[in-house]
Image (spheres, grey):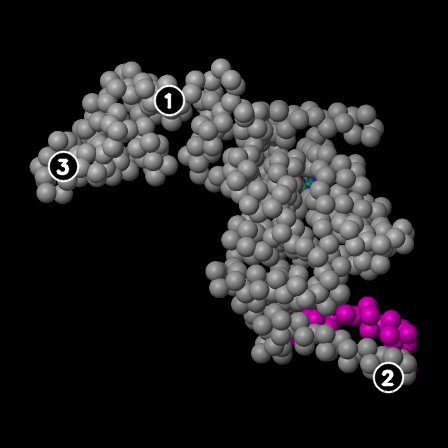
Amino acid sequence: MSGTSTTTMPILRIEHLSMKFGGLVAIGDLSFDVRRGEITALIGPNGAGKTTVFNCITGFYKPTEGMIRFTGHAGNEFLLERMPDFQITAKAKVARTFQNIRLFAGMTVLENLLIAQHNKLMKASGYTILGMLGIGGYQQAAAEAIEKARMWLEKADLIDRADDPAGDLPYGAQRRLEIARAMCTDPELLCLDEPAAGLNPRESLALNVLLRDIKENTGTSILLIEHDMSVVMEISDHIVVLEYGRKISDGTPEEVRTDPSVIAAYLGVDDEEVEDVLTEVGDEKVIEQLDTGPDIEHGPEASASMLAGPVSDTVVHGNGERVTVDVGASKAGQVKKMAPAPATAKPAVDKKAGIANRLSAPRDGKADNLKLIKGIGPVNEKKLNDHGIYHFDQIAAWKKADIEAVESYLAFTGRITRENWIAQAKALVKKAATKPATGRGGSK
Ligand SMILES: Nc1ncnc2c1ncn2[C@@H]1O[C@H](COP(=O)(O)OP(=O)(O)OP(=O)(O)O)[C@@H](O)[C@H]1O
């Protein structure tokens, strides 16, 4: 124990954490802080290692390497990686919930909250029957336990269901009950594994309210794993992003939201968006590489990850063993590697110049709806407009050199031909010509 003031110390400091399962590096050299009194979110694609981090913090796994330093509000310091799980709960006061709900379904809602305080009540009884019958502080402890349960039932908006079996509650209410139950143990750190999973928007909102209440009105710090970005961006003070067990971003919601590595690895759920980011910072080779998907031979076999593949880089463990996997697996890493663009890269204006039939503005101030061409989404429509292409007839008239110039800018080699944009554009021009009143065709 340090005994020093802890006001500026993070409640949790993860330092060079690694966790290896056989040849798979689920977490590699991960360091980050959970600051006191804040909500920290741990995000990343499926299989990125988030739950493994939780399992290391809460003592379910012993990490292969690294330190997990917990500093309580009174200056009490613990190295969690050295403690058995029950001590992490009891001494360090770290509570957690799981991805799948683990309530006592047959007990009432109130009983679930009382049983969470069982240890404290037993202690008050002096572990004797006489104690439980009223000698000593048991009665008072029991009254306090009921009062605390009542308070959390109210905060979790469950007071009307106190006497119902927990298993009868709707899903979102069960999630809140789990959190209320964890809070009845007076944790200093609350670790929540996907609390918004499966919730409808109304239930997500109720969850946000509850978590904000915990942050603002208790001393409890929260570490949250969550896929629901509406929850993460709304309530988090600090976000740490993992990809293949490595940290790729760490900052405020705004910083993380605009980090190209994150967009590519996780937030850019749509391939076109990933390509969009890469177009800004990379070249088409990277996109072609991504199109081929992950290298299964070097990665975890049956991971749930949509980006599942090799864990990147090499990790050297204490025993001298090295685990090396394909560096090229990380989409975020590829984006990072490509930025900033090399000084020799051609400026976009050169590529613009390559399209022969550019216009400075749409004719009659009205552009055609280029999204009617299969393969052109809103992002590419905007890019085409930015490059002076507004009308179907412009696309219909493209020659080989124009196609090359456009593909070079959009980084979609072969796509215009593959998706037959020219023929689609010609058909739309023809259609518009037969309905001149709609003004859709744009061929004037
Ligand atoms: N006990 C284990 N034995 C072997 N491999 C494991 C074990 N636990 C996790 N892994 C592997 O470690 C990697 C990280 O898994 P983890 O569950 O931590 O990811 P996650 O980011 O929480 O994913 P999700 O969002 O899908 O829950 C995965 O490839 C997973 O298969």
Q: Amino acid at mark 3?
A: Ala
- In the picture, measured across the screen, residue 16 lies left or right of residue 368, that is right
**Residue linked to disc 3:** 432
**Residue linked to disc 2:** 133
Q: Which residue is found at the position 58% from the left and 56% from the top?
A: 235
The answer to whether residue 19 is visible is no
Q: Look at discs 1 and 3 and give the one toward the viewer.
A: 1
Q: Which residue is found at the position 70% from the left and 26% from the top?
A: 314
Instruction: Return the mark for residue 4.
Output: none
Q: Amino acid at mark 1?
A: Val
Q: Which residue is found at the position 79% from the left and 38% from the top?
A: 66
Instruction: Return the mark for residue 349.
Output: 1
Q: In which quadrant of the rendered view does residue 384 lie?
A: top left
Q: In which quadrant of the rendered view does residue 127 lie?
A: bottom right
Image: magenta residue range: 107-130
Q: Confirm if mark 1 falls within 8 A of ligand 1.
A: no
Q: Main secondary structure of the magenta part?
A: helix
